[in-house]
Amino acid sequence: GAGVSQTPSNKVTEKGKYVELRCDPISGHTALYWYRQSLGQGPEFLIYFQGTGAADDSGLPNDRFFAVRPEGSVSTLKIQRTERGDSAVYLCASSSGSGSYTDTQYFGPGTRLTVL
Amino acid sequence: AQKITQTQPGMFVQEKEAVTLDCTYDTSDQSYGLFWYKQPSSGEMIFLIYQGSYDEQNATEGRYSLNFQKARKSANLVISASQLGDSAMYFCAMRGPNTGNQFYFGTGTSLTVIP
């Protein structure tokens, strides 16, 4: 079966522009997560969806970041007025959504965002 | 607060030898899960192995095993019979009932397998 897919794999944009990053989770997974990974660091949590709703958005750094999952499957992470500090790899993960702490998350290949 | 510490930024191992990657954690949760992921240069995080805090036996998955010492709050990954394809970044992560639904990751260990 297909794993988590993310598009685009690379995105280069200019400071101040708007970008959208897409994530397609594993079929049947109700939980979806976005993480951001800076160079030399582990992934940092941004937002978690259970179904269509954002159950936890405590990791979003500011109001320039927003994510949606309108039909409970594909999710889009949206960044407004990009800044150079937003440059990072954005990782998406999905899980079965059992809610248990044993629920393993499976990651996509990431989108490398570069803000010039 | 949850915290994962990986103190080895880089490790080298000879092909076919075993290697241990260290991970310590800090949590006030009684129940939690510990996970190891591999991240090759392609960037994808690949799930390797899971250990539950109440599991009595150390987890094993093929050449991967987890040396879980609950009292010391350590969950070291052991890779046996290293292969060139094992060269990658390795991340330890934790999740508990009080962490919400996010994983907390360490800073990772870069493993290089030498032929």
Image (tube, coloured by chain):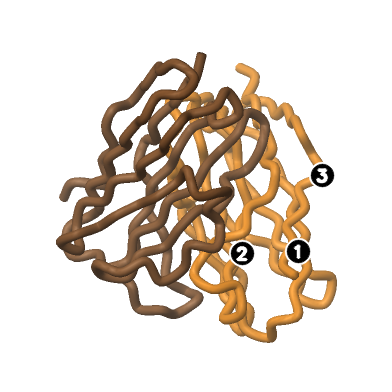
Chain colours: A brown, B orange
Q: Earlier in the sequence, mark 2 or mark 1?
A: 1
The location of residue A113, given as percent across then percent down, is 44, 26
Camera sees residue B56:
no
For the point 42% across and 36% down, which residue is it? A80
Q: Which of the chains bears the disc numbered 2? A: B
Q: Label 3 is placed on what type of residue?
A: Thr
Q: Secondary structure at mark 2?
A: strand
The location of residue B115, given as percent across then percent down, is 61, 17
Contact (CB < 8 A) between labels 2 and 1? yes
Q: CA distance from mark 2 to mark 1?
A: 8 Å
* Residue B7: mark: 3
Q: Earlier in the sequence, mark 2 or mark 3?
A: 3
Contact (CB < 8 A) between labels 2 and 3? no
The location of residue A103, given as percent across then percent down, is 42, 71
Q: Secondary structure at mark 3?
A: loop
* Residue B25: mark: 1
* Residue B94: mark: 2
**A37 is higher (above) or lower (below) than A9:** below
Q: Earlier in the sequence, mark 1 or mark 3?
A: 3
Q: Which of the chains bears the disc numbered 3? A: B
Which of A97/A71 is in front? A71
